[in-house]
């Protein structure tokens, strides 16, 4: 039993004759007859009663037709689904970001161009998002980390200076500029392990033989901002990810002119999928 044989049988049963079936499938009548004959001979059954005025289905033929009707209806539905996906009229894209501010403008542009695509935005630190990308849990990652992994493609979205964020009320730090030595004298709010900001800060302090005196570790960027606003300490963040907040004050570093980069990451093996390629085309910086 082959696909072509089932297709020929179904067309004959649907059209009520070999000639009409041949026209519908753009084949010759002998080719249609040959497919049906081989199907009957291969299984020792008769599927049609042939007469001068056409054909009628046998009992076995009627049962097989009920099956092929479901089969080719499912095929038509699958073809329609894939066509909608190919033209981006249907689909789902999941984007992970270490800070929503870095990717929302690209999501907005994508949704305007492809409004029928369902989108999901998930948060996490760089290490978490790279792990999710590699395990197909997300389709795109936007992180401050730029992994040296041959399976991951990337391009830089932006870069911003690292700054110190402190509470508006109180005098944990004097400004408008602050040194690393002065920073560690104040209570310091740190992100969880896996945060690129945390790694950069602690590596720089270690290079200078400096050690924070009083730290509090919180999970997530929003928790860091709220902790600072409530006066629990000061934090180091990328300037581009800080939204206007009257409870906060921002200070520049006087002796650490480091910048934080944000990278868009994708799996090279999936970069030609229509959904992913279209998002990359929209987000990729223009020359």
Image (cartoon, helix red, strand yellow):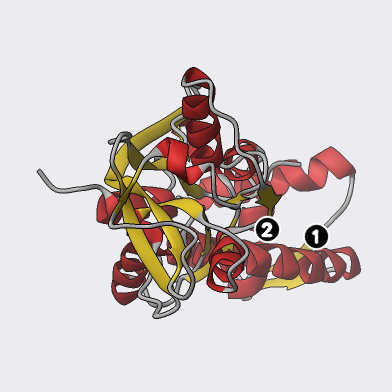
Near mark 2 (Cα within 10 A), the count class, few <14, some 14-19 or many ≥20, is many
Query: Image check: 65 left or right of 177?
Result: right
Q: Residue at left 61%, top 49%?
A: 191
What residue sits 89% from the left and 64% below the top? 60
Is 15 or 120 nearer to us in this picture? Answer: 120
Q: Image height check: is 184 above or below 83? A: above
Q: Earlier in the sequence, mark 2 or mark 1?
A: 2
Say which element carries label 1: loop
Quarter occupied by residue 175: bottom left
**Mark 1 Cα within 10 Å, few/some/many (few <14, many 20+)?**
many
Counting from the top left corner in percent of width and height, residue 137 is at 65, 49
Q: Mark 2 points at which residue?
A: 9
Mark whose residue sits in front, 2 or 1: 2
Q: Position of residue 103 (x, y in %)?
A: 38, 60
Q: Which residue lies furthest to the bottom in this view?
A: 246
Of residues 140 and 244, which is closer to you in this image? 244
Please state the total of marks drawn on the protein image.
2
Quadrant showing the N terminus: top right
Q: Mark 1 points at which residue?
A: 47
Q: In which quarter of the image is the C terminus?
A: top left
Element marked by disc 2: helix
Residue at 39% across, 60% down: 241
Are the two marked residues, 2 and 1, in contact with CB atoms closer than 8 angstroms? Answer: yes
Disc ID at residue 132: none
Judged left or right of residue 239, residue 71 is: right
């Amino acid at each position: 039993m082959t696909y072509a044989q089932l297709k020929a049988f179904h067309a004959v049963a649907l059209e009520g004759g070999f000639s009409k079936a041949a026209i519908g499938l753009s084949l010759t009548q002998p080719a249609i007859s040959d497919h049906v004959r081989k199907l009957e001979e291969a299984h020792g059954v008769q599927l049609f009663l042939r007469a001068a005025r056409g054909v009628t289905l046998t009992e076995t033929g009627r049962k097989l037709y009920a099956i092929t009707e479901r089969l080719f209806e499912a095929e038509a539905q699958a073809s329609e689904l894939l066509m909608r996906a190919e033209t981006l009229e249907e689909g789902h894209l999941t984007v992970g970001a270490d800070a929503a501010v870095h990717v929302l403008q690209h999501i907005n542009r994508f949704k305007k161009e492809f409004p029928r695509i369902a989108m999901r935005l998930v948060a996490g630190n760089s290490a978490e998002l790279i792990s999710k990308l590699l395990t197909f849990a997300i389709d795109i990652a936007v992180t401050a980390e730029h992994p040296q992994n041959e399976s991951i493609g990337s391009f830089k979205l932006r870069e911003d200076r690292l700054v110190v964020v402190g509470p508006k009320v109180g005098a944990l730090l004097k400004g408008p500029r602050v040194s690393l030595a002065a920073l560690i004298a104040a209570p310091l709010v740190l992100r969880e392990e896996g945060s690129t900001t945390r790694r950069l800060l602690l590596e720089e302090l270690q290079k200078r033989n400096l050690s924070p005196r009083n730290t509090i570790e919180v999970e997530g960027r929003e928790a860091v901002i709220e902790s600072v606003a409530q006066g629990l300490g000061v934090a180091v963040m990328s300037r581009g990810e800080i939204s206007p907040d009257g409870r906060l004050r921002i200070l520049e570093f006087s002796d650490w002119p480091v910048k934080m980069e944000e990278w868009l990451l994708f799996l090279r093996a999936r970069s030609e999928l229509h959904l992913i390629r279209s998002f990359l085309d929209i987000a990729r910086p223009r020359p």
